[in-house]
Amino acid sequence: MSSHPPVKILMVDDQPGKLLSYEAILAPLGEQLLKATSGREALEYLLKTDVAVVLMDVSMPEIDGYQLADMIREHPRFQKTAIIFISAVHLTDVDRLKGYERGAVDYISVPVIPELLRAKVSVFAELHRKTLQLEKLNRELEQRVVDRTEELRQSESQFRSLANSIPQLAWMADPDASIFWYNQRWYDYTGTTLDQIRGRAWRSLVHPDHVIEVMAGIERCWGMDEPWEDTFPLRGKDGSYRWFLSRALPIRDANGSVVRWFGTNTDITERKQAEEALVKAERMAAMGRLAGIIAHEINNPLEAISNAFYLLREHSSLNQDARRYAQLAQEELARLAHITKQTLGFYRESKQVVAVPLSELLDNVLELQSRRLKLNGIGVEKHYQTQGLIQGFPLELKQVFLNLIGNAVQAMPDGGRLRIRLQECSQAGSGKQGIRVAISDTGMGIRAEYAKRIFEPFFSTKEAKGTGLGLWISKGIIQKYEGTIRFRSVRLGGGNVTCFSVFIPAFTAVQSPEITAALMA
């Protein structure tokens, strides 16, 4: 049983039996469970009490789940209440989109998996609990600030002493919004002086993407003598930006006129990062489930094709060249089987590492791409300064370089030059010794706005042609070797040059139980 104060979970379904089952599943959470058998009864609960999560059936008489969600969202107090739909029928993407537009945060299909339902409800219940705690702390802080301001209005020195003691960045402004004082924490964070940011010059510290919106909000609220609140990044003295929740309260005289403003900036960077991490975790979990389903469905036909190629390779009608190509095709099928196994096993290897000469591996990949290279009229330049011997898993390394070289070939449909360089070098910054493989092409190039997203899952520069998983998977494989994969695309003369650089530290060339364990992890 949890020690934290329970929050209310409202369960809505026109079938009492389902409500009893949900109650039995959620009882171990220790939260307060409310049951409603209709939309009207649910609305009565909502108007009387604060609810953290609404768990509702999509199909109900009189008021269905979508209509009830619309009614809930129309009320200002429930606009952020978490709504989870439960559906016993298959929902299309249009149905799900319809639900999300009405405020749903998640879907659960029947039959309900108890562990999954408890996990989802507990996450939203805890978020609601934290939100209530944060709101309470903020209200308490704001009330303390207002009370202190009133008490110390006649004593400027005492007021400034208090402002310097709080953890927030603090400031005061004239009625026209011209700031004339900052506390010491502001100066410590920004590295500025009062003369540099007096008046409204502080706007230079706001992230350029947010300046217009922030200033418009200030003008609107301060023009009406109303409290102001906004969230945006502020630049620190080291040049980096952190997110702050900024608030300003009007201080009035006995006649109700605003005599000054008192504002605070609270650092919420960690909270935003935690929220983003939660969203990313959900996306990654969804991708993992999808990848597992796809890999499972591929396994059976893949095995049949592999068997057919094995029989074909041994057929007496084939000449030596045909046998060699059949052997090559069978090896590629083995690599594909390895990829599906990785997907099903969350990329966990089960074999021991072996010595892998990268020069031979790259030549093998070029041979596989030989037909496309010839059809596209692409010239190949190889500069191997070392054999590039490392300890690793040849199939997954081959997957990385097949992806990078394949992308380069696709970028040059009208011909060009493919250059591959293999050398021993030291890594810039860390000084680590290792092996670098650089793959350059003179193709279409990569647009600057894609640079930050190129390694994200499901992001592709090929529009409908690409899955957006190749570079993401390749980066994950190289990171397992504690290596790096980077790229650069520049405009050179009348064309483009794009280079992907893979660095693998030299310690992977040392066979040891510790390195093997690290690669197996």
Image (spheres, helix red, strand yellow):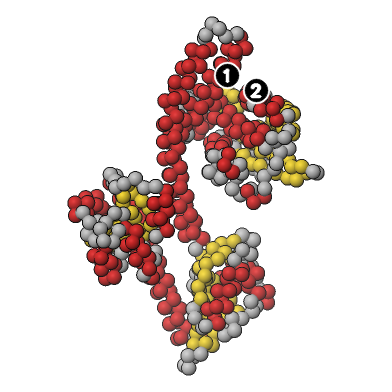
Q: Is residue 334 above or below residue 39?
A: above
**Residue at 68 percent of width and 74 percent of height:** 196
Q: Secondary structure at mark 1?
A: helix
Q: Tell me if residue 367 can be seen.
A: yes
Task: Give the distance between the C-alpha atoms of the residues marked 1 and 2, in whole angstroms.
Answer: 10 Å
Name the residue furthest front. Answer: 62
Query: What x and y, as percent, mark residue 277?
Result: 47, 52
- Give the residue at mark 1: 328
Q: Secondary structure at mark 2?
A: helix
Q: Earlier in the sequence, mark 1 or mark 2?
A: 1
Query: What x and y, as percent, mark residue 231?
Result: 52, 67
Tag 1–tag 2 contact (CB < 8 Å):
yes
**Relative to the observer, which residue lies in front, 476 or 316?**
316
**Residue at 66 percent of width and 74 percent of height:** 201
How dense is the environment of label 1, judged by Cα within 10 Å: few (below 14), some, or many (20 and up)? some
**Relative to the observer, which residue lies in front, 319 or 262?**
319
Q: Amino acid at mark 2?
A: Glu
The numbered disc on residue 210 is none
Q: Quadrant of residue 319?
A: top right
Query: What x and y, as percent, mark residue 280?
Result: 47, 50
The numbered disc on residue 367 is 2
